[in-house]
């Protein structure tokens, strides 16, 4: 029986030469989304997602039983995956990475739902190629406040020569991401991100915090610069999230940000509009050749 994209949820399904077993297994009960739907989403999105996701150290959220049992976070190559899933030792880390679309699909076959990544390539793991400023609002803070923070972050980075891009995370916050040429080391990049976060907290202490402490976060946005250390990860552009409704971490254009309702970005919705629209809102992300700027003053 041939796999037919939109009608057959239980028969065999082959995507990128990967045999997807149990395609009818529900991974998100609220929407009824299945493992097969996820595989088809990846088939459609791969052209957009692969530049950010392949050949990069990954961390996965795997949910072997859908949302019926707890998921787990995994940074090592799943046992049983083939050659399209690479692995190697990087210092103290045993990393895993996907070789091409097939690697991603094989991880989907192994029940990976979320794809998180280092800010560096597997081939150059000590030279970060992007900076992520992860904006984490305290519970109860409106999304509009996070949008304001992201716009302010964009300005601050631009003023020191860094163009940046924004994505909804599929959760409550936003990620502002700036590509950099892979030259500086982790210490330098982390110190830079820490410096930016601290400057925000010092300038507007009523709105921002730069320390992890939950107690000091009341009503504020934590500027989580800690995504920028060696071995730290952030959810990758276009990754589905293992959260109710199966949202996706989706790049958006800066000019659309004010009109965005993050709740509307789900795997279901994205699969639908990816049929027509296949333009990456981060189109020139890898074309920018930006150096890590000097910090105006350290810390
Ligand atoms: P939100 O917008 O809701 O904040 P987010 O993806 O930014 O969504 P965070 O909680 O801010 O979520 O980020 C947590 C990050 O920590 C993840 O991006 C992930 O890469 C990393 N991480 C490290 N360990 C784990 C773990 N055990 N489970 C989940 N994430 C983990
Ligand atoms: Mn976050
Ligand atoms: Mn965070």
Image (cartoon, rainbow, N blue to C red):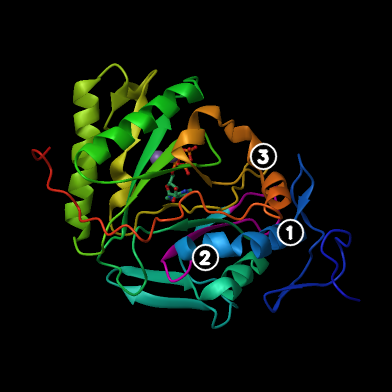
- To which quarter of the image does residue 137 belong? top left
| On screen, residue 190 above or below 262 | below
Q: Which mark is residue 50?
A: 2
User: In this rendering, is residue 215 above or below 268?
Assistant: above
- Which span of residues is magenta-colored? 54-71
Of mark 3 and mark 1, the one earlier in the sequence is 1
- Return the disc, 2 or 1, that comes first in the chain's sequence: 1
- The span from disc 3 to disc 1 (Cα, nearest Å) is 15 Å
Q: From the top left corner, tell me how far across and down residue 170 is, in percent.
A: 56, 41
Q: Are marks 2 and 3 in contact (CB under 8 Å)?
A: no
Circle 1 is placed at which residue position? 35
Q: Is residue 262 magenta?
A: no
Label 2: how many Cα within 10 Å (few below 14, some 14–19, many 20+): some
Residue 250 is labelled as: none
Where is residue 122 shown, x and y percent of the image?
A: 37, 71
- Residue depicted at 18% across the width and 47% down the height: 191
Q: How far apart are labels 2 and 3 at the CA level?
A: 25 Å
For the point 40% across and 25% down, which residue is it?
148
Q: Is residue 57 magenta?
A: yes
Tag 3 residue: 244
Is there CB contact under 8 Å for labels 3 and 1?
A: no
**What is the quadrant of residue 184 in the picture?**
bottom left
Secondary structure beneath dot 1 equals helix
Question: Quick one: label 2 or label 3, which is nearer the N terminus?
Answer: 2
Quadrant of the rendered image holding ligand 3: top left
Pinpoint residue 262: horizontal percent, then vertical percent: 58, 34
Instruction: Estimate how packed mark 3 is, as few (under 14), some (14 to 19) or many (20 or more) residues with alpha carbons within 10 Å.
Output: few
Residue, x 35% and y 58% (percent of image)?
Answer: 119
The spot of residue 294 in percent (x, y) is: 12, 47
């Amino acid at each position: 029986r041939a796999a037919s994209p939109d009608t057959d949820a239980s028969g065999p399904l082959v995507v990128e030469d990967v045999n997807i077993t149990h395609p009818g297994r529900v991974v998100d009960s609220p929407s009824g989304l299945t493992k097969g739907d996820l595989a088809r989403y990846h088939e459609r999105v791969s052209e957009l997602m692969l530049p950010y996701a392949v050949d990069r150290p990954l961390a996965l959220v795997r949910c072997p039983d859908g949302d019926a049992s707890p998921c787990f976070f995994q940074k090592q190559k799943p046992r049983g995956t083939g050659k399209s899933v690479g692995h190697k030792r990087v210092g103290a880390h045993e990393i895993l990475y996907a070789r091409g679309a097939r690697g991603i699909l094989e991880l989907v076959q192994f029940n990976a739902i979320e794809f998180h990544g280092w800010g560096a390539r597997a081939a150059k793991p000590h030279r970060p190629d992007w900076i992520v400023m992860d904006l984490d609002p305290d519970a109860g803070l409106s999304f509009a406040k996070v949008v304001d923070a992201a716009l302010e972050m964009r300005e601050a980075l631009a003023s020191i020569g860094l163009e940046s891009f924004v994505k909804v995370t599929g959760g409550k916050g936003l990620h502002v991401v700036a590509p950099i040429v892979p030259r500086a080391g982790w210490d330098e990049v982390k110190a830079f991100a820490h410096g930016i976060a601290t400057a925000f907290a010092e300038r507007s202490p009523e709105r921002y915090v730069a320390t992890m402490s939950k107690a000091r976060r009341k009503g504020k946005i934590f500027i989580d610069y800690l995504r920028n250390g060696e071995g730290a990860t952030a959810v990758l552009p276009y990754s589905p999230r293992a959260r109710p409704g199966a949202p996706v971490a989706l790049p958006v254009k800066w000019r659309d940000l004010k009109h965005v309702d993050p709740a509307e970005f789900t795997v279901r919705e994205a699969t639908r509009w990816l049929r027509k629209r296949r333009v990456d809102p981060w189109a020139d992300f890898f074309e920018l050749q930006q150096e890590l700027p000097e910090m105006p003053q350290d810390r």
